[in-house]
C-alpha cells in the first residue's frame, strides 16, 4: 500500500515568509522618504547651478543678467509653481525677456513649488562684477507637502549660495507648503 504525501508548508517556513514580508513593509516608507529627500536635494542643486550660471554670465559678458521664473517666457513671476526658468542678458533693463535680450538659458523645471524672496522683486539680477542686485533666498516646498524636508537656497551679499534644510517655512500670508 502506498501512502500519499500531502504537500504543505511547515510552521517554520510560514514564520520565515511572514518575517520577510514584515521587514519589507517596514522598509517601504523609509525608502519613499529617501527617494523624496534625494529628489529635493537634486532640485535645490539644479537651482544652485542656475544661479551660478547667471552670475558667471554677468561677469563674462560684462552686462546685467537676470534669472527668473516665467509662465509666458517673457514676464518674471514671484512664485514659481511650475514655470520656465529664464536666464537672459537684460540689455534694456526692463526685467522682461523681450526682443533684443539674449536668452542664455530657458527650460522647464520639474514640478515644484519654489518661492523667491528677494528685495520684493520677482527676479534676481547680477551686475557685471558678479554681485547680486537683489538679496534673498529661494524656498523649495517638498513635493510630499510636509515641511520637514523643505529647503532654502540662500544668496549672500557677494553672490555665493548655500543651502539649508528648514522645519518651518517663511511664506507670505495665506501661502503654505501643505
Image (cartoon, rainbow, N blue to C red):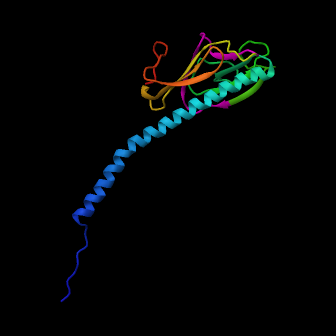
Question: How many labels were placed on the picture?
Answer: 0
- Seen in the picture, residue 38 relative to 134 is either above or below; the reply is below
The residue closer to the viewer here, 70 or 145, is 145
* Residue 120 on image: x %, y %: 59, 10
List the single residue furthest toward the top: 119
Q: Quadrant of the C terminus?
A: top left
In the shown orientation, is residue 98 left or right of residue 2?
right
Q: Position of residue 69 (x, y in %)?
A: 63, 23
Q: Is residue 158 above or below residue 110?
A: above
Placement of 104 over or under 26, stated as above or below: above
Query: Looking at this view, is 10 or 55 the one in front?
Result: 55
Q: Residue at x 56, y 35 (%)?
A: 42
Q: Is residue 116 magenta?
A: yes
User: Residue 92, position in %: x, y?
Assistant: 79, 13
Locate residue 129 relative to residue 158 in the image: left or right: right
Chain part drawn in magenta = 107-128
Amino acid at each position: 500500500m502506498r501512502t500519499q504525501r500531502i504537500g504543505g508548508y511547515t510552521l517554520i517556513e510560514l514564520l520565515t515568509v511572514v518575517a520577510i514580508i514584515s521587514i519589507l513593509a517596514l522598509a517601504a516608507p523609509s525608502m519613499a522618504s529617501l527617494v523624496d529627500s534625494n529628489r529635493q536635494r537634486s532640485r535645490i542643486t539644479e537651482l544652485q547651478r542656475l544661479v551660478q550660471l547667471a552670475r558667471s554670465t554677468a561677469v563674462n559678458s560684462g552686462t546685467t543678467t537676470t534669472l527668473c521664473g516665467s509662465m509666458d517666457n517673457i514676464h518674471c513671476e514671484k512664485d514659481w509653481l511650475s514655470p520656465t526658468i529664464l536666464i537672459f542678458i537684460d540689455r534694456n533693463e526692463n526685467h522682461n525677456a523681450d526682443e533684443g535680450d539674449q536668452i542664455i538659458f530657458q527650460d522647464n523645471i520639474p514640478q515644484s513649488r519654489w518661492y523667491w524672496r528677494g528685495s520684493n522683486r520677482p527676479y534676481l539680477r547680477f551686475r557685471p562684477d558678479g554681485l547680486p542686485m537683489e538679496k534673498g533666498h529661494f524656498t523649495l516646498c517638498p513635493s510630499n507637502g510636509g515641511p520637514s524636508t523643505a529647503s532654502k537656497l540662500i544668496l549672500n551679499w557677494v553672490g555665493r549660495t548655500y543651502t539649508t534644510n528648514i522645519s518651518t517655512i517663511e511664506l507670505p500670508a495665506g501661502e503654505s507648503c501643505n
